[in-house]
Amino acid sequence: MHSKEECKYLISLGKPHMVKSTVVDSQTGKSKDRRFAFFSSWGANKLRDKIIKTIEKRIADYTFIPADHGEGLQVLYYEEGQKYDPHYDYFVDEFNTKNGGQRMATMLLYLSDVEEGGETVFPTANMSFSSVPWYNELSECGKKGLSVKPRMGDALLFWSMRPDATLDPSSLHGGCPVIKGNKWSSTRWMHVGDEEETKHNAKTNTTTEVKDEESLMDGSDRADTGHVDNMVHSVEEAIIRKAILKGPISVRTRQVRGY
């Protein structure tokens, strides 16, 4: 999906600017500390050079969602022990929905390999989690849901809205704790509306928190995947249908291998 050079470039942009992740308060629209996320992030919404524009266009070509419907790329960094508890990327409050338009899909770019842990996990996916070929490679957290291991150059697309435009609760996802090594990733949120409607949301890493996280995963995290377009209609298909992509985007599956 993206080259090693692009991965290193995004890391180099984000590394000097890492700050504690925040969310937008659903009542006031102001930033506040995230209660259940433990990682650093930086938004590239104000920096759109040739490389970033190329990545954004590639994502648009792959998803069929126009580039101007996306927020700026977010660069995320996790050290050992850091994680991201279960959450939705779609909005459930009136403030963000009115001012930014609903988020319909997320593209997660893996910028580094992770020696152990750090999986993206979907705890509510309706399938046998152990049926995936890489199940034995997962951490204990990763085995608690449908999970994808991070690998440099890979990308994961999941949908927060179904084809009928209803919100998809099976897109609940989180990031498992990094056990060994560190994890770099980049997120691109895509909206129903264009950038002029959504650009204010790119100022902060905004997601919908899950209040009762203990009932979902005993304090661990989950991963990313959801309902898709008329080609893939479930979280399960989103992860099971994979493709090795060399060069230009040519296959419309949901988990994308890097160069």
Image (cartoon, rainbow, N blue to C red):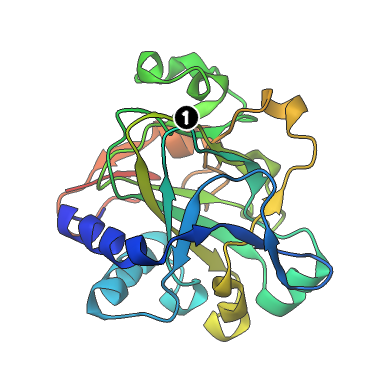
In the image, is residue 155 above or below residue 29?
Answer: above
- Say which element carries label 1: strand
Residue 179 in the image: x percent, y percent?
A: 41, 26
The residue indicated by pointer 1 is 147
Residue situated in front as seen by the camera: 204 or 238: 204
Camera sees residue 26: yes
Locate residue 195 relative to residue 246 in the image: left or right: right
**69 displayed left or right of 200:** left
Residue appearing at x 32%, y 72% in the figure: 57
Reply above or below: 41 against 232.
Answer: below
- Residue 233, given in percent of the width and then of the height, sits at 55, 43
Q: Can I make out residue 249 in this image? A: no
Image: 70 above or below 245: below
The residue closer to the viewer here, 84 or 230, is 84
Q: Residue at x 60, y 45 (%)?
A: 37
Residue 106 % position (x, y): 50, 56
Q: Quadrant of residue 18?
A: bottom left
Residue sitting at 23 percent across and 63 percent down?
9
Taking the image as shown, residue 244 lies to the left or right of residue 108, namely: left
What amino acid is at disc 1?
Ser
Dot 1 crowding, Cα within 10 Å, few <14, some 14–19, many 20+: many
Q: Using residue 9 as the reference point, say whether residue 239 is left or right of it.
A: right
Labels in figure, total: 1
Q: Residue at x 32, y 33 (%)?
A: 181
Residue 109 in picture, x, y percent from top left = 36, 52
